[in-house]
Image (spheres, rainbow, N blue to C red):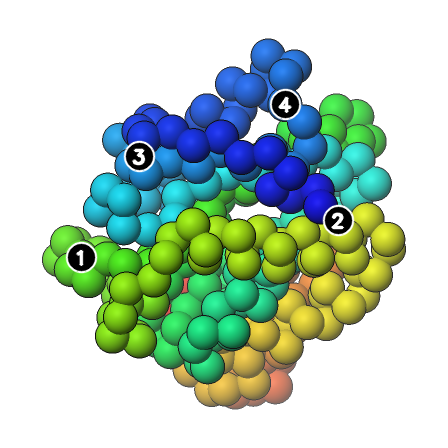
Amino acid sequence: MIIGSEIIFLQSAESTNTTASEYLKSGKAREGLVIRAAYQSSGKGQQGNRWESEEGKNLLFSVILFPTMVNPEDQFLISGFISLGITDFLKTMISDCKIKWPNDIYAGNDKIAGILIENSISGRTLTSSVAGIGLNINQAVFPDRIPNPVSLKVITGKDHDTTGCLEGLLKCLDKRYKMVITGDRDQIRNDYTGSLYRLNEWHEFRSGEEIFSGRILSVGDSGLLMVENKAGQTREFAFKEIEFIL
């Protein structure tokens, strides 16, 4: 087992990604090291947002990887396999689980998990990745400012053992990472596309000042989202260039 071969638990951390980055800089981190915290004072989310979580209720952790076998132009594979590992785990407990591009995890129309990946590149080598994961397990009440959160407890009506959930999740992540290592990358890409939230469904999107009706067709190797509009044109969007209207 690579991911989860070593786990460091902290009662509190500013951010598990920040702590993991410090371990990287110290040169003491082995691949697969997991930094887990019961609470984050400044948890990091996408687009500079904060990831908020009630202490001890959810899974908050970061994984250190050295994916030097992945070319920098293919770094979206990291996001892909992490997203799939989470959905693989969740599907053992709930039925309706999808990846909202690029890497939010949805249960129905609500967000149950978020991912923040910070890659380091040197020349033509992807030297390291820190993958931060927040998965809502037992939190039942969320701040009003969070748009559409949900947790396993809200869905299933019962509490879950967070340590047991972590063990199951790490196994799923490890299995997917080994697919990246062994070169089974087309399967990762195909499974990722097949797991997309609102795949092949007509919905409203916003791009800049424009609101248009479109349907998601696929995701390119570089991570661009391919959306067809009503005129039959396929457009490609990078992260932050398109917004789902929920």
* Front: mark 2 or 3: 3
> Callout 1, which amino acid?
Phe
Give the Cα distance between marks 1 and 4: 34 Å
The dot on residue 40 is 3
Give the Cα distance between marks 4 and 3: 21 Å
Decide: is 166 above or below 228.
above
Determine the secondary structure under disc 4: loop
Which label's residue is closer to the chain start, 4 or 3?
A: 4
Residue drawn where x is 65% and y is 14% of the image: 27
- Specify the quadrant of the image occupied by residue 117: top right
Q: Please tell me how crowded label 4 is: few (under 14), some (14-19), or many (20+) other residues with Cα within 10 Å.
A: some
Q: Please tell me how crowded label 3 is: few (under 14), some (14-19), or many (20+) other residues with Cα within 10 Å.
A: many
> Callout 2, which amino acid?
Asp
Q: Position of residue 40 (x, y in %)?
A: 30, 34
The dot on residue 29 is 4
> Callout 4, which amino acid?
Ala
Determine the secondary structure under disc 1: loop
Residue with the mark numbered 1: 142
Which label's residue is closer to the chain start, 1 or 2?
A: 2
> Callout 3, which amino acid?
Gln
Residue with the mark numbered 2: 74
Give the Cα distance between marks 4 and 2: 24 Å
The furthest residue to the right: 183
Q: Position of residue 164 (x, y in %)?
A: 45, 55
- With 69 as the anchor, is 169 left or right in this view? left
Which label's residue is closer to the chain start, 4 or 2?
A: 4
- With 78 as the anchor, is 143 left or right in this view? left
The furthest residue to the top: 26
